[in-house]
Amino acid sequence: MIPLKDAHLKFIEHLKEKNRSNSTVLAYGKDIDQLVEFLEELKRARVTDVSQPDVEAFLAKLLKNGYTPKSVSRKTNAVKTFFRYLKVNEFLTDDPALLVSHPKFEVKPPRILNETEYRALRDAVHADTRTYAVVELLLQTGMRIGELARLTMADVKLGKGARAGEVHISSFNRHPERSVPLNSRAQKALEAYLKERVEGTAKNVFITRNSRPLLVRNIRATIKRYLDLAGIEDATVNDLRHTFIAQHIKRGASLVLVSKVAGHRRLSTTEKYLDHVQVTAPQEKMELAEL
């Protein structure tokens, strides 16, 4: 019968071994910290002491303490993953979180930038070569911000002549490995940045002036600043990915193609965007346009 604190440590090591992102490991670690602290107050020292009512009481306390239903739903995911790990590894016979329900909350539709907005962002950022390349890659390839931050020079193949370029995106955090084409606009922006990129030992494509990898949080903050400068309200860097997906679906790109390029594990994830865009052509085009 393993103590809760030891189970917590084993769970964190398991997440790291599975190559979950640092942000996921950190968030899940804090969530389970909260759970363990709560259970200790209930005198539950070992994983076998925990019952479904205990887990439900923990989540109810979070709601009472002012956490939003969306936040509690995310923490519910962490708790369910934790106990599922313990059961799979036979630290538990019965999973106390298996039948625990998520709190209900309204899911906001994706924020999709229209052409006027993303052109305004492009104008606002144009003089900043590195950030302009970031914006164009996110907008023209639909890659995730974490995938962009992890891109290395070896992942980039620039096109020559009529041959198109591409970037290779490695499998990470359960997202599939794939190659994403670089259109002319994305390649030109990337080439301009690489000409000014500081030479150094860093393998990452996007680096600071000190040749250190550009972190996700720095990218978020920078893009947010330019979104505000361009007068684009209620938008974040993640919405450039939403815009890539939605605009191509709107223009009649094949759902299968968009899903593959975006790195969706399920086609149903891509299909959800159909509820938020007015499709102007059949979903049959097997090539992507420039935005």
Image (cartoon, rainbow, N blue to C red):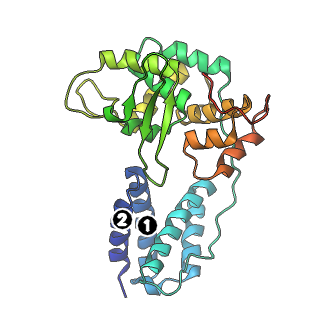
Q: Work out whether residue 43 can be spotted.
A: no
Q: Residue at x 22, y 26 (%)?
A: 210
Residue 197, horizontal then vertical, whole percent:
29, 20
The quadrant of the rendering that contains the N terminus is: bottom left
Amino acid marked by disc 2: Ile
Residue 170, horizontal then vertical, whole percent:
41, 45
Q: Residue at x 73, y 31 (%)?
A: 252
Please say if 95 is above or below 284. Answer: below
Q: Look at the numbered disc 2 and give the secondary structure of its residue.
A: helix
Please say if 116 is above or below 65. Answer: above
- Camera-side residue: 239 or 62? 239
Q: CB of mark 2 within 8 Å of CB of mark 1?
A: yes
**Residue sitting farthest toward the left:** 201
**Residue sitting farthest toward the front:** 162
Amino acid marked by disc 1: Ile
Q: Residue at x 55, y 27 (%)?
A: 140
Q: Look at the numbered disc 1 and give the secondary structure of its residue.
A: helix
- Camera-side residue: 154 or 206? 154
Disc number placed over residue 32 in the picture, else none: 1
The answer for how far apart the CA atoms under marks 2 and 1 are is: 10 Å
**How crowded is the residue under tag 1: few (<14 C-alpha within 10 Å), some, or many (20+)?**
many
Residue 111, horizontal then vertical, whole percent:
65, 35
| Callout in the foreground (2, 1) | 2
Q: Work out whether residue 20 can be spotted.
A: yes
Location of mark 2 (residue): 12
- Camera-side residue: 78 or 172? 172
First-in-chain label (2 vs 1)? 2
Please say if 120 is above or below 206. Answer: above
**How crowded is the residue under tag 2: few (<14 C-alpha within 10 Å), some, or many (20+)?**
some
